[in-house]
Structure formats: C-alpha cells, structure tokens
Image (tube, grey):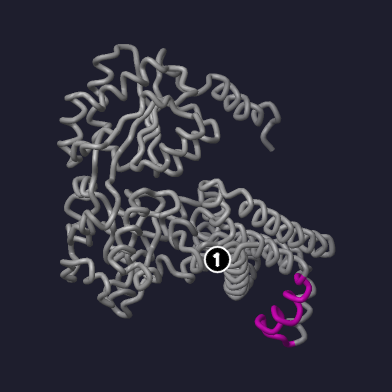
Amino acid sequence: MSPDAQSALWLSIQVAVAATLINAALGVPLAYLLARRRSWGLGAVDLLVTLPLVLPPTITGYYLIVLLGRRGLLGAPLYELTGWTVAFTWAAAVIAATVMALPLLVRTARAAIESVDRDLERAAYTLGRSEWQTALTVTLPLARNGILAGLVLCFARALGEFGATLMLAGNIPGRTTTAPLAIYTAVQTGESAEVLTLVAALTLLSAAVLLVAGRLGARAT
Amino acid sequence: MVPLARLAVLPMLAVLLGLAGPPPAAAQEVVVSAAISAKDALEALHPRFVAGHPGAAVRYNWGASGALQKQIEAGAPVDVFVSAARRPMDELERAGLIVAASRRDFARNALVVVKPADSPLGLRRPADLLDPRVARLVIGNPRTVPAGQYAEQSLRALGLWERLRPRLILAENVRQALEYVARGEVDAGFVYTTDAVPGGARVREAFRPPEESYGPVLYPAAVVAASRQRRLAQAFVDLLLGPEGRAALARFGFLPPAVGAR
C-alpha cells in the first residue's frame, strides 16, 4: 500500500474515532433527554440533530461553510480572536464527520433508552436515587447494548463521510484526505492500484464494524 | 392508519414521472467537455453556434482538463474536447480517442497570482509568497488541473516549491481555486488571467509569475473520435478558430495561440 493510501486510511480511522468520542459525549446525554422529556425546545434540537441524516451531504457541507468558513458566522469571530480558521484542517474533517454521524447515534441510543422499563427507574427513585444517579446506574447500563450499537454505527458513518468533508476540509493529502476522498481522487486520475487497495481496506473495515454492530444489536433487547 | 390504496398513489406517481424520462434531447445535440477556465468565453459563443446551426443544441460539461480526459477514456459520450493543456489532449491522441486531423490550438492563457480583495498583504513578487502571513496558498491539484501543473512548474522554476508546499491547498479545478481566494479562505492563489473577470470585485491581482517559469499555456480543441455528431462537432471547433471565436476569447482575456502552435 502506498504511503498516501496508508496516510489516508490512518487519517480516516483517527477522524472516525475522534468523531465517535465527541458524539458519545454529546449524543448519549442528548438521547437520554429526548427519550425521557418532552418540550418544544427539545423537539427543535431533535430536528436540528436529525437534519444531516436526511439532507444531501453537500447541503450540510454548505451550512458548515456558512458557519465555520473564514468569513462564516462563527468562523469570522474565531479568526479575529485567534487568527485560526477551521476550514482545510484536520479539525474540519472531524467536525464534518461528527455532524453527519451524530443522528445515527442519537436515534439508536434513544430507542434503546426508551425501551428500558420505566418501572425500574421508578423503583430507583422510591429508593432515594436522584434522576442523575438513576440514569447512570440503572437506565444507561440497561440500554448499554443499544447505545454501543449506536456508537458502532456512528463510527462506520464517520469512517465513510465524504461530501461534507470535501466541502469543509478540502482534499489535502496528509491532512484532510480521508480514505473516501483518496478513492475519489484516485478514480479521477485513473490510479487503479491505489483504488483497489483502499477500497479493499475500507470494505473489510466497514464489514467488521457492521458485524460488531449486528452482534450488539441482537443482544440489545 | 392510511388505507393501503392511498399509500400506493405516491409511488405510482413517482414511477409515472420516471417513465416520462428526462427532458427530450434536441434533434442534434453536441456535448462539449471543456476546461472550466474557458467557461465564460464558450458561453458567450453559444448563441453564435446555435444561430448558425438551427435545430442544434450544445451541452457543456465543465471541469479540470485532466478529469475530463479520464471521462473520455472511460467512454463518456462527448463530441468535442476543449483542454487547457496539451498533455490531456496528447494522451487522448496517443490512445486514438480524438480525430487527430481536427486538433488545433485556439487560444493562449497566462498565470496570475490573486489575493482576496480586502487582503492587507502587499504581494508584488513571487518571493513575497514566502511571507509567513501567507498561511494558505491555493493551486489546482497538479494531478488533474492544468493551472495547478503550471503553478507547480512555475514555483519549482523559481525555487519556491519546497518551501511553499506545506502551505498549499489543492483545488479540484481552477474556478474552485478562484472561489477559495474570493471567499477569503486562503491568502493567495494561482489562477489564469482570464479568471479575473469572473472573480470580479472579490479578488485582486497581486502579480504575474514570469512567463519563462512555466510552459506556454496553450488550449487545444479536438473532435472526439467516438462522436456521433462529427459534422456539428467540427463546426464547433471551427467556430472557436474563426473570427467570432477569436473575438469572444479576446473579450475575456485570452491571447491568440502563439506561432508554433498546432
């Protein structure tokens, strides 16, 4: 495997791991709130989080540019303050993957949490546990397999992210060229050997990830 | 629960619309795969071609010449290939994919370094690009974009390539490079002098790299061998080479092909 292909694969894994960790921290609490509370505000958050799942990835990419580009709504003040901008950096690849994969985690985890028997939670409350303690020691452990399945799906989605990444992070070998982007360029330039190795590696990795997700999903109920 | 019959209506509508098919192609349609840097000039020529060939229509496929070349090699149904560099055309000619007799150079272009209109940097010579405040420099991806290949050639000839390499952002085609500069995402970029017009008020010219530092930017056009509209395709190429073509190209900043061009 060429050094470029290796670096693309390694970059993809790094980005996917980072995106999954961020989504775990953001998505699991969010899934809990969406499962256990109802409010107008939460409904809006749910919509916002789910949008990247249904919008064409290039539209999500466009919004990310509007938000985080050097002249973007958030990007401009960031640049004024720090002289740094997100576009074309490794961070941009992580952000794009995170945003695109979050809905997968939230929906799966939410379903798992909703399926936890509320009587068990109520039992914990009567025994004097706060909601926070109950969530940590009763609800989430019971929803564990579903949450893990969500995390695995999130990882797989982050690994394969292409459209929004290309728009926000660009295609810079060694910095933001993830495996899907490298395959795109290699196909464009007709480099079949490079294409084959990357396609094989990514397919094997994704299949392994799906296998794990399937096993976890089967044990989830 | 919605009755099952009602659920079936939407998919049926979708199938019916699908069967209606894409909008019917004109009786004689010419597909032109053209380097995106020639977009404005070719679009300006379009009415002339249609006026001279009633019933004919032209569809344009814009992109980087290298990418367009690969599409033709893969069998894309293209009638005319307009390239911003010789190499993609040479490779197609070697593979027998163009009508060699139809190949002609029709224009010349030059590189220019541009910066965002509100840039505080005074970039006047190539060496000024080494200024640490030039954190990001965009060029077309040299693997597929002629403008990027010329930019690399020029930077290497000027001894700046190795030092500027870590700061390079690669664009998929020269218009994307222009867009990055216009949006302020980068501090400077290599584009063609003809891209200044579409760039408009959002970019400013910084300097022109010395012409000796990169190969002549010659634009060849040719009829694709597999074309089913050879007559119309040849007419399109002829239009490019004729007085109306030259006038349109000149209006957008293209130079006439140099002596010694084919």
**Label 1: few (<14), some (14–19) or many (≥20) C-alpha neighbours in 10 Å:** many
Q: Nearer the viewer, residue B262 or A165?
A: B262
How far from the left and from the top, in percent, is residue B60? 37, 31
Magenta stretch encompasses residue B258: no
Residue found 25% across the figure and 76% down from its top: B131
How far from the left and from the top, in percent, is residue B130? 27, 74
Is residue B129 in sight in this rendering? yes
> Which residue, given by chain and number where applicable, does mark 1 sit on?
A98
Q: Nearer the viewer, residue B215 or B116?
A: B215
Q: Nearer the viewer, residue B179 or B148?
A: B148
Judged by its main secondary structure, the magenta piece is helix
Q: Which residues are magenta?
A: A128-144
Q: Nearer the viewer, residue B116 or B32?
A: B32
How far from the left and from the top, in percent, is residue A27? 60, 69
The amino acid sitting under disc 1 is Thr
Magenta stretch encompasses residue A129: yes
Secondary structure beneath dot 1 equals helix
The quarter of the image holding the C terminus of chain A is: bottom right
Side of A212 relative to B209 (left or right): right
Residue found 70% across the figure and 55% down from its top: A200
Depicted B85 relative to depicted A122: above or below = above
